[in-house]
Amino acid sequence: MESGGPTVAVAGAGLRGSTYARRVRATGRGRIVAVAEPDPVRRERFAWEHDLPPERVFSDWRALALAGRLADGVIIATQDADHAEPAVRLAGLGYHVLLEKPMATREADAERVVAAAERAGTMLAVCHVLRYTPYTRAIREIIAAGRIGTPVSVQHLEPVGWWHQAHSYVRGNWRREDESGPMLMTKSVHDIDWIIHVMGEVPARVGSFGRLSHFRPENRPDGAAARCLDCAVEPGCAYSAPRLYLSCVGDPEREAWPLSAVTRDFTEDGVLDALRTGPYGRCVYACDNDVVDHQVVNMEFPSGATATFTMTAFSPYAQRQTRIFGTAGCVEGDGARLTVRDFVTGEAETIDATGGETSPDGRHDAADDALADAFVAALAAGDPAPLSSDGRQSLASHRVVWAAERARLTGTVVSVDPSPTSPAKGTASP
């Protein structure tokens, strides 16, 4: 290994992989030394940005694996269906792994990932970025200090956003369960894991309801065309592709996402050309999507505490919103501010829980940075302590999601297999 801090390879140089890699480079605490990316434009751009020699630039993760272990750790940010195989193979080569969520699209594959890391004795961390926000730390500190007594029930909302749903889950890469996974896994395993992290225990039973209600052919307006650019009713449609993507032109943040998924030509002509021919110009009522657009999950914990989680497309794109009700008080938060009410005094305190770092529109930029920092720190120390969760804990969160999906599809309440490494009630600490 080269000296000068831990070295990191990246498998998947899209938005997520590039975000983590830039943070590693920006801090100077670690170095990016290799990349595997099938898209030639992304691959070349990444290699240029990180000054990688040709022998450290690979067309896919398999080619990277054939080269042997080139770094201390690897960030795996490939497409969802292509998480498990590189994680198993690269962990087996001795790489410590930072794996984008979900761990895998099937429960058996997630179990293989954990087993591979344990067999190799390597660190495995899944990108549960919500664990790394100042907001989350503040909530856990409030609970650990006993300010609301014992938590008894939780209400948690993920407002996906109407245009975000259309972009990613109707027109985009996560629209079909057979290509990526159910919506609850691809979008909301973050939230299920967060609830477990805050409550300090894994649910014992779950139930769930939800379906694809709106983005269906039978809801297509009269006179609507197959593409927005040909559509007479497009100006009055909430899901107009031209309105969304043309408004991104000239805004660097919105060009980075969501526009970068649509085209690499950030001009009006470039956007219009992509909407004429590509998937993001399709009518939202004439796509091949099948993931749900709203879902509720009910959870019962071993302690008897309960939680409800709601994911909905039909909202602004915003931070998660949570209420936690305890025996001596309650706390309500919107991703930026927390209001804590004391049942003894009746007084309410409002806390700025952003640390000056939380975006109001649902992005988790600061948490991405904190997660990348934690991974590099763990590599430098040879110790997983800086990481908020390990493979077994992530597997437990994923199992709750799969149980909830079984409950939704069968109309039953499903028991969650207990994990011997699940955190016990009361053991969570900030």
Image (cartoon, rainbow, N blue to C red):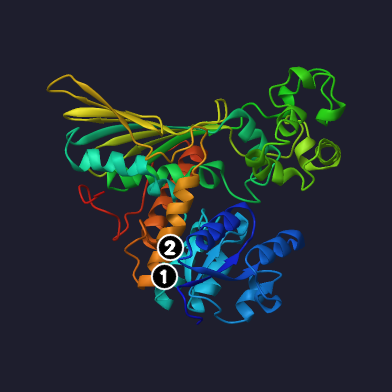
Residue 262, percent from left and from top: 74, 43
Q: Residue at x 50, y 77 (%)?
A: 92
Compute the Cα span from label 1 to label 2: 6 Å
Whether tag 1 and tag 2 are in contact, CB under 8 A, the answer is yes
Q: Which residue is mark 2?
A: 375
Residue 343 appearing in the image: yes
Which three-letter amino acid code belongs to the residue tagged 2? Phe
Compared with 412, 54 (above or below) is below
Front-most of residues 220 and 266: 266
Q: Amino acid at mark 1?
A: Leu
- Name the residue nearer the viewer: 393 or 27: 27
Q: For the residue labelled by badge 1, is the local secondary structure a helix, a strand or a loop? A: helix
Q: Tell me which corner region of the image, top left, top right, bottom left or bottom right, holds residue 288.
A: top right
Q: Position of residue 105 (x, y in %)?
A: 56, 55
Q: Going 53% across and 64% down the picture, which residue do you hit?
A: 75
Q: What is the quadrant of residue 255 in the picture?
A: top right
Q: Position of residue 179 (x, y in %)?
A: 66, 51
**Is residue 204 visible in this depiction of the protein?**
no
**Residue carrying label 1:** 379
